[in-house]
Amino acid sequence: MLMKKILIFSFLLTSCHLFAQDSLKTFNYSRNQITTTGMKVLGSWAVANIGVGAAGWANSKGGTNKYFYQMTTIWGAANLGAALLGYTGTRNNGNQSSRAADVLKAQKKIEKIFLINGGLDIAYIGTGIYLTHRGNSRNSDQLKGYGPAVIAQGVFLLLFDGTMYSTHRHEGNKLRQFLEKNPVTFNGKTVGLIYHL
């Protein structure tokens, strides 16, 4: 009788472990896919900015247009670098841990990154507005060209980071709900129980 209970408990524990492991791997995969797609969008925006910016810069006769396209090209290069770093970083995360604590930590980290980026985007928009105002008061073509370019980049990045944060937050909420419903964890060596106070 005792042996039967031990076997049933072992079977249930193993079943919970396998289910949780597969589900946590799915959450890791989903997070990486969302980020990879986002980096492709950012990279495409960057390449378009480099192309349009470089063509406009080369063909401008000076004035505010020259500086608008110049700043657009610079931002395009910076965005392309960020997209490449993000893409390769996500691609290198293929064998992430399937421990509940590690998956939750990675989820919180990616949400925090895009939330902080959203705050920076608002600062970019504010900086662009300041440059435009300063350019108008000093009659500076450079500042009058840089300002709108920075505003345009800030607006796009705010939409991008807001969308990425919202999407990751949605996935994170599903993960948190999953962990609340499946409190038994097993990493191959130890059994854990998540208990919420």
Image (cartoon, helix red, strand yellow):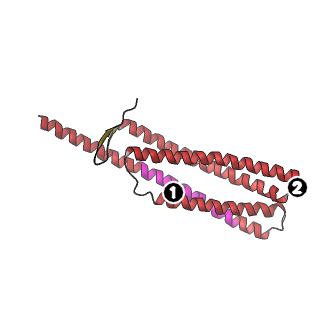
Which x, y percent locates residue 48? 66, 63
Taking the magenta stretch, the answer to whether it contains residue 42 is yes
Q: Is residue 16 left or right of residue 148?
A: left
What residue appears at the point 73 percent right and 69 percent down from the top-left corner?
A: 55
- The kind of residue tagged 2 is Asn
Residue nearer the viewer, 29 or 130: 130
Residue nearer the viewer, 133 or 152: 133
What residue appears at the point 74 percent right and 56 percent down from the top-left corner?
A: 149
- Residue under numbered circle 2: 139
**Position of 140 relative to 167 (above/below):** below
- The kind of residue tagged 1 is Thr
What residue appears at the point 75 percent right and 63 percent down from the top-left corner?
A: 69
Which x, y percent locates residue 88? 50, 61
Which x, y percent locates residue 175? 43, 42
User: Do the residues bearing badges 1 and 2 touch, measured as CB atoms within 8 Å?
Assistant: no
Question: Is residue 43 at least partly visible in the picture?
Answer: no
Q: Is residue 13 left or right of residue 98?
A: left
Residue range (magenta) = 27-51
What residue appears at the point 68 percent right and 62 percent down from the top-left corner?
A: 49
Label 1 packing within 10 angstroms: few (<14), some (14-19), many (20+): many
Assign the C terminus to one quadrant of the image: top left
Assign the N terminus to one quadrant of the image: top left
Mark 1–mark 2 Cα distance, whole angstroms, equals 43 Å
Residue nearer the viewer, 100 or 48: 100
**Position of 172 relative to 70 (above/below):** above
- Tell me the mark number nearer the camera, choosing from 1 and 2: 2
Identify the residue at the far left of this view: 1
**For residue 36, which numbered disc appears in the image?**
1
Identify the residue at the far top of this view: 197
Looking at the rendered structure, the secondary structure element under dot 1 is: helix
> For residue 10, which quarter of the picture?
top left
Identify the residue at the far bottom of this view: 58
